[in-house]
Amino acid sequence: MYRMDPNSCYVLKIRLLGNPKKARKEAMCFYFEKVIDSDLTNYEDLVESIIVQYQPRYLEVAHVHYYDEVLKTFPEIKSDQELMYMFEKHAKSKMVQMFIVYWEPSEPYEPIIEYYSDVHIQPKNNVDQDDDSYLRNPIPENEHVGIDEENIYLKEEPKALNVVLLPDKEKDQDYVVD
């Protein structure tokens, strides 16, 4: 089993965009995340893995962009060198906002200049701490009840879900369960 190197591991937050002339107005994009190892990823393999998973329409070509937080621009990636440059720019955060635009080659490509999103993604680690101690447990070691301790609260013995129960009068009194 292969484990990724935490120093070269990046989270790609990818938005798939279609041709705005053909896309539905209510659906701006499709969003997904992908974790990759920058040491083992090249441009062609990255684009191919996305295209295999989320296929474009017939004859559409994928254009790859990322959001540069310093310059506030959306540079297009076309080579391994540009991909490595993108990883270098995001070495501190280890997270990259990427955009994959599917476009027909018969039409002139219009690169992303700006992107408006109605969806605001909140980070998963933004938990507010309790300001008061009103509901805080005074004995934290008794916070969780173990599996063995739960049985003291049961009035009847647990019954398996895949067993058909018969009324008590029809039970065989001589049968002993192992």
Image: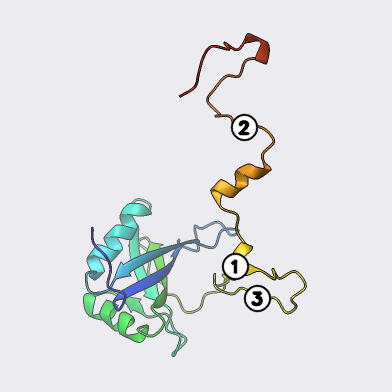
Q: CA distance from mark 2 to mark 1?
A: 49 Å
Q: Which mark is residue 157?
A: 2
Q: Position of residue 119 (x, y in %)?
A: 59, 67
Look at the picture and state if 48 lies above or below 162. Answer: below
- State the residue position of label 3: 128
Q: Which amino acid type is shown beneath numbered disc 1?
A: Val
Which quadrant of the view contains residue 164?
top right
Q: Look at the image and tell me whether residue 154 can be seen.
A: yes
The residue lying at 35 percent from left, 53 percent from top is: 53
Q: In the orientation shown, which residue stands out farthest toward the right?
A: 134
Q: Which amino acid type is shown beneath numbered disc 2?
A: Glu
Q: Position of residue 114 (x, y in %)?
A: 50, 78
Q: Provide the secondary structure element on which disc 3 rests.
A: loop
Viewer-nearest residue: 62 or 51: 51
Q: Position of residue 122 (x, y in %)?
A: 58, 71
Does label 3 or label 1 sit earlier along the sequence?
A: 1
The residue lying at 54 percent from left, 69 percent from top is: 124
Of the 4 image quadrants, the one containing the N terminus is bottom left
Q: Nearer the viewer, mark 2 or mark 3?
A: 2
Classed neighbour count for the residue bearing mark 3: other residues with Cα under 10 Å, few (<14), some (14–19), many (≥20): few
Q: Which amino acid type is shown beneath numbered disc 3?
A: Asp
Classed neighbour count for the residue bearing mark 1: other residues with Cα under 10 Å, few (<14), some (14–19), many (≥20): few
Q: CA distance from mark 2 to mark 3?
A: 40 Å
60 on left or right of 70 = left
Counting the numbered discs, the total is 3
Q: Look at the image and tell me whether residue 59 can be seen.
A: no
Q: Nearer the viewer, mark 3 or mark 1?
A: 3
Classed neighbour count for the residue bearing mark 2: other residues with Cα under 10 Å, few (<14), some (14–19), many (≥20): few
Q: Nearer the viewer, mark 2 or mark 1?
A: 2
Viewer-nearest residue: 81 or 27: 81
- State the residue position of label 1: 119
